[in-house]
Amino acid sequence: MEYPQRTDLIMPEYGRNMQQMVEHAITIPDREERMRCAQTIISVMGNMFPCLRDVNEFKHKLWDHLAMMSRYRLDIDYPYEIIPKDKSTEKVQKIPYPSSQIRYMHYGHLVHDMISVALEMEEGERRDCFVSFIANYMKKQYLTWNKDAVDDDKIQNDLLELSGGKLTFKDLSLKNSKDLVARKKQRQNNYRKNKNG
């Protein structure tokens, strides 16, 4: 078996055959012939991702990839300025993840934000309506992550806990679990129909 002895692919998305084509191009002694080979490789690379042809600077990106795949050993006249070797190996800085603690992850951060807004509102019909919206949204989120039916008392208790005992929906009844799930399925079906034609 020769597979264990093979070198690692520099850009796996192009595959081993493309890597071998680049390695062959490096060995061509004639500069013009090497350039023609590189242009052919770029054409094949572009055909592998036809959906990206309309993207700005797609060709430039392909030439950058060719240089990286050759480990910057391919001696040709590049039609674009190539990313320098030291820039291509720089590690991308991680985006810091928000460190705020969410009590119930299945409700998400938006519920906490809405509860904060509701707590600042004056008591009355408008606030009650908003609390009803929050509770229905919590029920919908609960059903997204927990496919079982959820009892309104569970939502009531969670809302009380998340609001520090200040928000409740005493006389309101939440939407039926089946209605929330059916509405979600209807939106998904409509999306698929619109997407397919």
Image: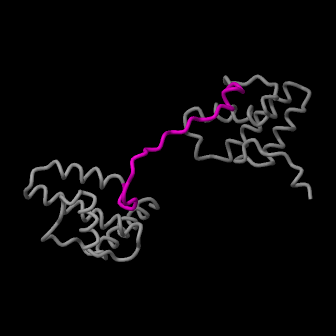
Q: Nearer the viewer, residue 26 or 100?
A: 100
> Seen in the image, is 119 located left or right of residue 197?
left
* Location of the N terminus (image quadrant): bottom right
Residue 166 on the magenta segment: no
Q: Main secondary structure of the magenta part?
A: loop
Residue at 44%, 61% (x, y): give it: 197
> Seen in the image, is 186 located left or right of residue 18?
left
> Seen in the image, is 51 located left or right of residue 4?
left
Q: Which of 118 and 102 is in front in this view?
A: 102
Question: Which range is magenta?
Answer: 83-108
Question: Where is residue 19 shown, x and y percent of the image?
Answer: 80, 43
Residue at 32%, 69% (x, y): give it: 183
Question: Where is residue 147 shown, x and y percent of the image?
Answer: 41, 73
Residue at 36%, 58% (x, y): give it: 103
Residue 102 on the magenta segment: yes
When the figure is inspected, residue 23 is found, relative to residue 118, above or below; the finding is above
> Seen in the image, is 46 located left or right of residue 170?
right
